[in-house]
């Protein structure tokens, strides 16, 4: 059984320490990026650094990311108003045996979840026209389903500058067992590499 942590605020210092040295959902795509070895290697070394120092690594943020964080409460309210689903905010869901976890934007009832993205109008337009879950978010969303053991996630893309009928796009995503099995295997193998490199570095003189 995974452990759901609710008594910590996302983005807080305690939240950062809770995630320190663990593979997290927002970076599962980096673990899968074998064709882009630099991406995977960079993330591996980041986790090794966190394990050795006990301190979370500062990650890159830009204006779009800051705006997304500011808009998240409004996106959640818009989602709840549209669907009638009540969203429970949680800090972190820890995998039962692996040093891995996810920080979803909410859980719903006993078997659902929510992943919110606050985006600029051009991204919202692409998402609406293409329909479905954008491929760049698949690892994060299916990773949530894997770690949490839940059945579905509503992916909600929110863009407040768009006309009212286009501000909120919702796509229900269900478990993809084959994808989850591969993701679980890749994350487990990645964490073995992290462990091995940590032990190697600790033994160096």
Image: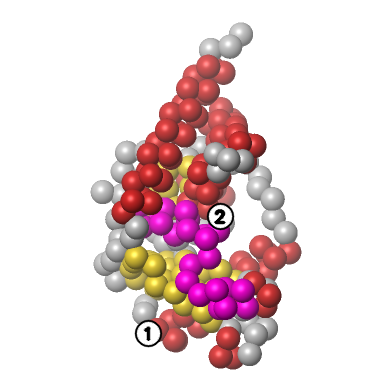
Q: Which mark is residue 12?
A: 2
Q: Quadrant of the C terminus?
A: top right
Q: Which mark's residue is nearer the viewer, 1 or 2?
A: 1
Residue drawn at (33%, 51%) of the image: 178
Residue at the right extreme of this rendering? 63
Q: Is residue 161 magenta?
A: no
Residue 113 place in picture, x, y as percent: 38, 67
> Looking at the image, which is closer to me, 7 or 95?
95
Residue 90 place in picture, x, y as percent: 42, 61
* Colour scheme of the rendered structure: secondary structure
Q: Is residue 161 above or below residue 114?
A: below
Left or right of 164 in this view: 145: left
> Looking at the image, which is closer to me, 179 or 102?
179
Q: Is residue 164 above or below residue 22?
A: below
Which type of secondary structure does the marked residue at label 2 adopt?
A: loop
Residue carrying label 1: 84
- The residue segment tinted magenta is 125-147
């Amino acid at each position: 059984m995974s452990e759901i942590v609710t008594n910590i605020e996302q983005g807080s210092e305690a939240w950062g320490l809770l995630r320190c040295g663990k593979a997290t959902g927002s970076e599962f795509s980096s673990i899968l990026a074998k064709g882009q070895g630099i991406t995977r290697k960079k993330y591996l070394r980041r986790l090794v650094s966190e394990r050795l120092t006990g301190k979370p690594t500062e990650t890159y943020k830009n204006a779009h990311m800051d705006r997304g964080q500011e808009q998240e409460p409004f996106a959640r309210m818009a989602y709840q108003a549209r669907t009638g689903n009540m969203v429970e905010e949680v800090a972190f869901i820890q995998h039962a045996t692996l040093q891995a976890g996810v920080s979803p934007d909410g859980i719903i009832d006993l078997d659902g979840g929510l992943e919110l993205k606050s985006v600029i109008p051009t991204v919202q337009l692409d998402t609406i026209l293409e329909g479905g879950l954008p491929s760049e978010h698949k690892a994060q969303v299916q990773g949530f389903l894997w770690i949490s053991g839940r059945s579905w996630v509503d992916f909600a893309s929110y863009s407040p500058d768009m006309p009212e009928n286009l501000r909120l796009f919702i796509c229900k995503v269900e478990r993809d067992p084959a994808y989850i099995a591969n993701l679980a295997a890749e994350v487990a193998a990645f964490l073995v590499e992290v462990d091995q490199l940590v032990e190697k570095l600790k033994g160096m003189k």
